[in-house]
Image (cartoon, helix red, strand yellow):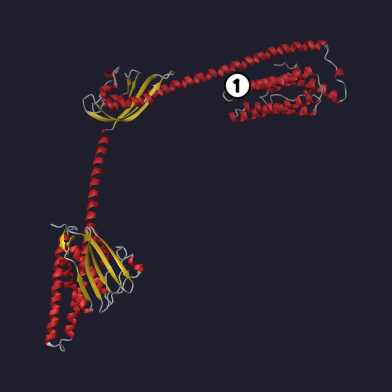
Amino acid sequence: MYLLTSDILNDVNTADSENKKPVVVWSDQLLTGLDDIDDQHRKLLDMINELGRLQACDTSLVELINVYGKLKDYTRYHFQHEEDLMNAWPVNETNKVEHFKAHHDFIERIGQIDRLIESHPSYVVDHLLAFQLKWLIHHISDMDALMAVEVLALQAGKALQSIARKPRAMANKDQVNNSINDLYDGIETRSLEVLDLNVLLQAEIARRKQAVEDAQLAVLVFDNSSKAMTVTNADNEIIAVNPAFTQLTGYLPEEVMGMNPGILSSGRHDQAFYQQMWESLDATGHWDGELWNRHKNGEIFAEGLSINTIYKKDGSVDRRVSVFSDITQKKLDEEKIAQQAVELKQLADMTIELNIKLSQEIAVKNRLFSIIAHDLRSPFTILLGLSDRMFKKADTLSKEKLSAQASSINRVAKNVFTALENLLEWSHSQLDGEKIDIQKVPLGEIVDATLDLLHPVADAKGIAITNNIQNDYILADYHYLLTVLRNLVSNAIKFTNQGGTIDISSQTTGTMVDIAVSDTGTGISENIIDKLFAIDQKTTTLGTGNEKGSGLGLPLCAELVKKMGGVIKVESTHGTGSRFVFSLPVAPQP
């Protein structure tokens, strides 16, 4: 620290006593003769006065630190400017070194103040103002004044050796002042150290006060928590319980002190359960879960438990804190919900099964209606045609022709009735779900039954049907096979012109019998062949006699043949006819 001349100090102290506004008043005795240096000195004193004014007005910490930062930055700028000036002129080297050292020491002292200003701004600002003001005024009146004398002389062209030196008596006085200043500077340094210790002491006091408050809060939480709590030591012995523990378990504190928490065990959990719990505690210091424990009166209750470990500095276990609550009702509710979920799933499964069964039954009934409609359409058409023709020509026909027409109508009606009876009997058997009855079936007999029904239809169009069926026995469902043959022969009649021919034949190949229905009809276009057996693409075309169809016959045939373990295919050339072939297994010989 540096001493001030008495007249300048008087100005400083007088100004400082008048409501701290300003801290110091500029004096011309501080002029160095270097205009830029003097302007910077004035600005530094203005900034010191501003910092003092803000501190006296209890300004916020943020604003104080902001102004302090500006003062610090401008001081560094001023020092750099002085050093650049002294480096630019060949001033006395000893004086320059001392000057630069003074700058360095000041910056170092400011660094000490930086560490303390945020925690104790008011105290530090007071110290900073006193230190910086006294140091700056002495620095200006001593070192800066000497620097100015040398620089101004050099700028005037004088030799450095010609510059007047201080009288010996003045030099001796300066030595005394410097010694006192060094002593004062040491006191200032120690005051900063004491301040630093005071800050640390205040922080420790605050920390301990907070620790006491935290401990008191922890006790309040422990005693007033609605959840049961236990504290155990490293040996898993209970050392503390809260009132909620007694309320939940029925045990008084003195009954469980020093006991293992296992006294609450219900016996419902095996060794593996507790082993997993301890493995988690040892590995992570934490465990969360649910378990069943026993009340003092013997009642079993479910609890949600959370255990956390408190460690010592060396990493060993110090305490374990357990927090738990009664979740018995929650568990009962969960079990009820789980049971209801099972029942709902069963109900949903039953609904799905019923829907599937219903869909299957609807599909069966739809298929039955399709089969009945398809199989009876052609015979009824012929029957209606014959009866209509006989009705219209009854007056012109001879008795013999009327008898022949009536005989034809009677034969067709009987065949239709037989077919209808068979269809109705089969349909009735299918109402409870589609059933397939694979058995040994005489192929020739089924072909004959088919032709008995459809011959009148072919005769009406002048179509000759040839039966080349071998006396084969195949494995098939009688009604399925009859439906397939009726559909294929009916379609052949439908798409064959007047005077055409139809051939029905069979051939055994290995374990399969190929049954073919060929005609000399119109044939099938290539773009239609691939769609014939597709259930989702209805393909219907008027017959050669403008007969209508439903488009369901061939897809139905393909489905029934597949269910009987066979396959169906078609060979056709547009304009020359078609050949439908389906294969079914040969019946084993007895």
Determine whether 426 is above or below 267 in the image.
below
Determine whether, in the image, residue 399 is placed left or right of residue 518.
Answer: left
Which secondary structure, mark 1? helix
Q: Amino acid at mark 1?
A: Tyr
Determine whether 410 is above or below 260 in the image.
below
Determine whether 390 is above or below 547 in the image.
below
Determine whether, in the image, residue 502 is placed left or right of residue 20.
Answer: left
Residue 292 image point, x, y percent: 26, 29
Return the residue found at the far bottom. 396
Residue bearing the label numbered 1: 123
Residue 138 image point, x, y percent: 74, 19
Determine whether, in the image, residue 186 is placed left or right of residue 243.
Answer: right
Determine whether 172 is above or below 72 in the image.
above
Residue 242 image point, x, y percent: 32, 23
Seen from the viewer's position, the closer of residues 465 and 244 is 465
At horizontal 27% and vertical 21% (from top left) the residue drawn is 252
Looking at the rendering, which quadrant does residue 539 occupy? bottom left
